Image: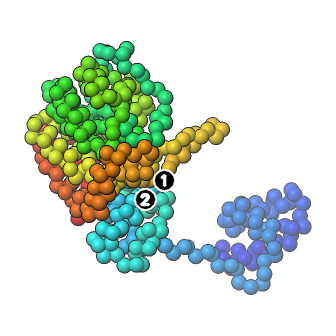
Amino acid sequence: MGRSSRWEYLKAIHPRYRQADRQEKKIILNEFCRNTGYHRKYAIRLLNGPPPGRGRPPCPRRPRTPTYSTQVISVLGAVWEAAGYPCGVRLKALLPLWMPWTRKRFRLAPAVEKPLLRISARQIDRRLRARKKRVQHRLYGQTKPGTLLKHMIPIKTDHWQVKMPGFAEVDLVSHSGNSASGEFAYSLNLTDVHTGWTETRALLGKGLEGVLAALDDIHAVLPFQLRGIDSDNGSEFINWHVGRWCARHDLQFSRSRPYKKDDNAYIEQKNWTHVRKLMGWDRYDTPQAVEAMNDLYRHELRLWLNLFQPSAKLLKKVRVGSKLRRRYDVPRTPLDRLVASEGNDSDYLTSRNNLLHRREELDPFALSRQIEAKLQRVYALANVRQSPRVSSNDKPRRVTF
């Protein structure tokens, strides 16, 4: 039955339906749906609506034309890949920060730049959905609980309620590949709870000297005063040496509950985004590989993540019936949170101003290319024989321009 025939049928059946009783209406409605193929709810709206006019039947609604052109989505996808695949909320906050360099690199016209800045976070996730399906990940870990001094180090189970930088979580990420035997590389990750500022160092094995050297190196380059660290129950942290190191620097030292990863939620998230997502799951067990990793951690990657990568911080959780709603603040970079934080130390103002000035000079796209080149150098130093065999689609990927 064509559109005109269905319209004529509606005009003939409409008055009879309006005058019928409840039982007869049900019979007429069933017959009308079978003959026209209309959905039952749509048929009810037609029959209960005003009488159809004598003119032509209404034309179907035209599909909405795309608001964002293919060029806008192409530039958006390129920025998304260069920024390390952030979510829509973070990418929305990142676009104005990267716009001066995006404008130069892609020679954006006003017709492309305006919708690129206007696009919403939900629309970003919708338009990049197909590309996100290509990014896959797996996660491995190697930890061994320590027992020494556990009764002397307090357990921290409450939520962090700090309004100043300096209280950090610390953890190790193993690069053992398929085998946990022998000596291999670890990445020591330290994340500030308030700002999200993250520093990473690589070490061969998790012995005393390597852990303390990495902590000293991180402590020396932090743009704020370190006030306390919180670790898991691994023996690399729960020992007398790290305890004396904290006492020497006047730091608060606490630990999480055994087998409770949520107690260290901040660092566990950074272990994926700042280490595993980039370094993959290959085995690195040579001094050359550790040196190449530290060359990346100390320079380009540190600036790229802390100066150009916004993150959304969880503010609170609200219980609404049986659901738990999470409230987040506006996505900001760790440097922006550091500048706006309370209790700024005057001793560190110079270093923060230098970082702000350096961000204005650095090109994030050029920084992304340098990170890609150094990552390829690190990948070439992996122990292929003891690394997991995965397809090319599962390997960490970054875009090069």
Q: 10 Å neighbourhood of mark 1: few (<14), some, or many (≥20)?
A: few
Q: Is residue 93 above or below residue 59?
A: above
User: Callout 2, which amino acid?
Assistant: Ala
| Mark 2 Cα shell of 10 Å, populated few (<14), some (14-19), many (≥20) | many
Q: Which numbered circle lies on residue 359? A: none
Choose between 377 and 299: the one closer to the eye: 299
51 relative to 176, above or below: below
* Kind of residue sitting beneath label 1: Val
> Where is residue 67 drawn, in percent x and y?
49, 73
Q: Secondary structure at mark 1?
A: loop
Q: Going 31% across and 32% down the picture, which residue do you hit?
A: 171
The answer to whether 43 appears left or right of 18 in the picture is: left
Q: Is residue 192 visible?
A: yes
Quadrant assignment, res 62: bottom right
> In terms of image quadrants, where is residue 360?
bottom left
State the SS at label 2.
Answer: helix
Q: Is residue 82 visible?
A: no
Residues at discs 2 and 1 in contact (Cβ within 8 Å): yes
Q: Residue 153: x and y, percent?
A: 37, 19
Query: Which image quarter is the N terminus in?
Result: bottom right
Pick whichever of labels 2 and 1 is earlier in the sequence.
2
* Residue 187 image position (x, y, % from top left): 23, 37
In the displayed structure, does residue 56 sit left or right of residue 392? right
Which residue sits at x=54%, y=41%?
A: 316
Q: Is residue 52 above or below residue 349?
A: below
Relative to 106, say whether 360 is above or below. above
At 43% from the left edge and 43% from the top edge, which residue is drawn? Answer: 343
Pointer 1 residue: 330
Question: 258 and 385: which one is in front?
Answer: 258
| Residue to which mark 2 is pinned | 93
Name the image quarter holding residue 256. Answer: top left
What is the residue that sits farthest to the bottom in this orientation?
55
